[in-house]
C-alpha cells in the first residue's frame, strides 16, 4: 500500500495534498501529511514493533495519558489545549492504529509552528526540568494501570544480567581483551550500588511513576537520562576522554526547574537519590554499550569496529565525573529545598 492509501484508513479531515518524510527520529518512520484548504495537517508514523512489540498496550498507554492530561487542562481552563497535548485519530475500524498486513501505523494532528531544539543551554535546561516534572505531576493521579511497552528497559538488574550473559557467551571473543576486562571490573565493582532502585522498589520505599516514554518507571528515568546527554560536555562517542566532564551548571539549572515542578508529588527518598539517578544513566548506558561490543555489535549502529568500545570508555569517564560531583549535587539540592 502507498502512503495515501494508509492515510485513507484513518478518519481524518480534508483531502491529502502531500506526504513527505518529517523530523529526525531514530525509532519510528515519520511523515507529515499536508491537506488541502482549512483542514489540519497530520503526522503519520510507522511504529517500529521491533522496539514496541505490543502495539495495543503502547497505544492504550498513550490514549490513557493524553486523555488524562487533556481533562486536567480543560478543568484548569487552559488556553490553546490542542497545542499542549497530542490528539490521535482513530482508524476507520475504531482502533488507534492501522495494520496493513506488514506494518503498524498511527496518525495524529500536527501541531503547527513547533521548533525542535538540538542544543541545551542553561536557560533551556531549567525549562526542560520543570516540564518533565509538570508532566509527571499531571499523571500522579492517573487512575489507569499502564503497562510496559518496553519491559525492563531501565531495569539495572536486568541490564547487568544481559551483560553477564554476553560475557558467558563471548560470541566475539572481545570479553578477553585486557581493556574490556578493566572496564568490566569498574562495572561490577559498582553493580550492587547501582541496583539499589530495584531493591528500594521491592521494599516498598520507592514508587514508580509515569515517565516520558509513557510507561511506569522511576522518576530517575527522566531526570537521569536527560542529564546523561545534556550535562556531558561532549558527545557520547567522543574518543577524546579529556573532553568528557560533567557540566554542573546544566545540572543546577535542570534540577532547580525539576524540583519546582515536582513539589506536589516528589518524596524524600526520590529527592535523596537524584544524584544517584544522575550517575545511574551513564552507568546503565556503559553497561549496554560494552555488552553490545562483546556480543559483536548487534544492537547499536556502529560506524567502525571499536565504536561501542569508544562509547563505553566515554560513559565510564562520565560516570566517574558524576560520582565525583555527588557532594556538590547533594549540597545544591539541600539549598534548593530551603528556598
Image (spheres, rainbow, N blue to C red):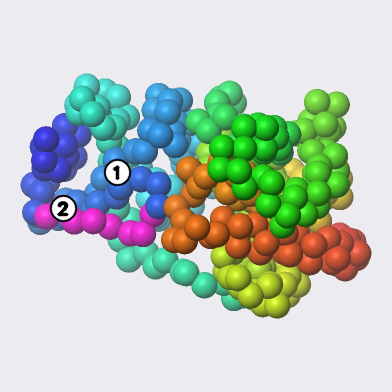
Q: Is residue 265 above or below residue 149?
A: below
| Residue 219: image location, x then y, percent | 69, 44
Circle on res. 45: 1
**Can residue 16 be seen here?**
yes
Q: Residue at x 44, y 61 (%)?
A: 303
- Distance between the Cα atoms at labels 1 and 2? 11 Å
In this rendered view, identify the residue nearer to me: 319 or 164: 164
Q: Is residue 240 left or right of residue 28?
A: right
Please, what secondary structure does the residue beneath circle 2 have? strand
In this rendered view, identify the residue nearer to me: 82 or 126: 126
From the image, which quarter does the C terminus lie in? Answer: bottom right
Pointer 2: what residue?
19
Circle on res. 303: none
Q: In terms of sequence position, does the residue under pointer 1 or pointer 2 come before the other?
A: 2
Please, what secondary structure does the residue beneath circle 1 have? strand
From the image, which quarter does the N terminus lie in? Answer: top left
Mark 1 Cα-neighbour bin, 10 Å: few <14, some 14–19, many ≥20: some
Q: Is residue 92 left or right of residue 239?
A: left
Tell me where the magenta segment starts and ends, as one range: 18-25
| Residue 315: image location, x then y, percent | 67, 60
| Residue 53: image location, x then y, percent | 42, 28
Q: Is residue 335 above or below residue 86?
A: below
Q: Residue at x 74, y 43 (%)?
A: 265
Asked if residue 22 is among those painted magenta in the image, a careful observer would answer yes
| Residue 256: image location, x then y, percent | 74, 65
Asked if residue 165 is among those painted magenta in the image, a careful observer would answer no
Mark 2 Cα-neighbour bin, 10 Å: few <14, some 14–19, many ≥20: some
Q: Is residue 188 left or right of residue 286?
A: right
Q: Residue at x 38, y 54 (%)?
A: 25
Amino acid at each position: 500500500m502507498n502512503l495515501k492509501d494508509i492515510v485513507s484508513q484513518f478518519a481524518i479531515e480534508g483531502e491529502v495534498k502531500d506526504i513527505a518524510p518529517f523530523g529526525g527520529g531514530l525509532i519510528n518512520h515519520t511523515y507529515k501529511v499536508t491537506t488541502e484548504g482549512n483542514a489540519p495537517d497530520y503526522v503519520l508514523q510507522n511504529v517500529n514493533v521491533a522496539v514496541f512489540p505490543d502495539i495495543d498496550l503502547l497505544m492504550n498507554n498513550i490514549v490513557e495519558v493524553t486523555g488524562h492530561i487533556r481533562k486536567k487542562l480543560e478543568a484548569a481552563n487552559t488556553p490553546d489545549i490542542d497545542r499542549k497535548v497530542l490528539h490521535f485519530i482513530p482508524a476507520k475500524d475504531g482502533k488507534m492504529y492501522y495494520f496493513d498486513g506488514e506494518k503498524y501505523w498511527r496518525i495524529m494532528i500536527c501541531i503547527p509552528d513547533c521548533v525542535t531544539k538540538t542544543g541545551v543551554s542553561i536557560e533551556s535546561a531549567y525549562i526542560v526540568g520543570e516540564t518533565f516534572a509538570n508532566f509527571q505531576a499531571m499523571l500522579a493521579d492517573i487512575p489507569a494501570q499502564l503497562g510496559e511497552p518496553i519491559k525492563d528497559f531501565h531495569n539495572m538488574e536486568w541490564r547487568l544480567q544481559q551483560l553477564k550473559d554476553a560475557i558467558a557467551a563471548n560470541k566475539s571473543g572481545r570479553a578477553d581483551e585486557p581493556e574490556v576486562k578493566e572496564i568490566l571490573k569498574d562495572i561490577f565493582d559498582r553493580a550492587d550500588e547501582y541496583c539499589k532502585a530495584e531493591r528500594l522498589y521491592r521494599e516498598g520505599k520507592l514508587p514508580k511513576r509515569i515517565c516520558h516514554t509513557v510507561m511506569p518507571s522511576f522518576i530517575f528515568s527522566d531526570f537521569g537520562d536527560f542529564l546523561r546527554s545534556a550535562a556531558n560536555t561532549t558527545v557520547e562517542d567522543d574518543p577524546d576522554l579529556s573532553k568528557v566532564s560533567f557540566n554542573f551548571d546544566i545540572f543546577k539549572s535542570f534540577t532547580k526547574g525539576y524540583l519546582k515542578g515536582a513539589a506536589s508529588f516528589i518524596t524524600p527518598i526520590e529527592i535523596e537519590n537524584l544524584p544517584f539517578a544522575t550517575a545511574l544513566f551513564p552507568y546503565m548506558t556503559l553497561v549496554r554499550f560494552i555488552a553490545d561490543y562483546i556480543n559483536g555489535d548487534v544492537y547499536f549502529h556502529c560506524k567502525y569496529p571499536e565504536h561501542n568500545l569508544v562509547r563505553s570508555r566515554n560513559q565510564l569517564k562520565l560516570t566517574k565525573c558524576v560520582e565525583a560531583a555527588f557532594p556538590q549535587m547533594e549540597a545544591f539540592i539541600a539549598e534548593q529545598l530551603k528556598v
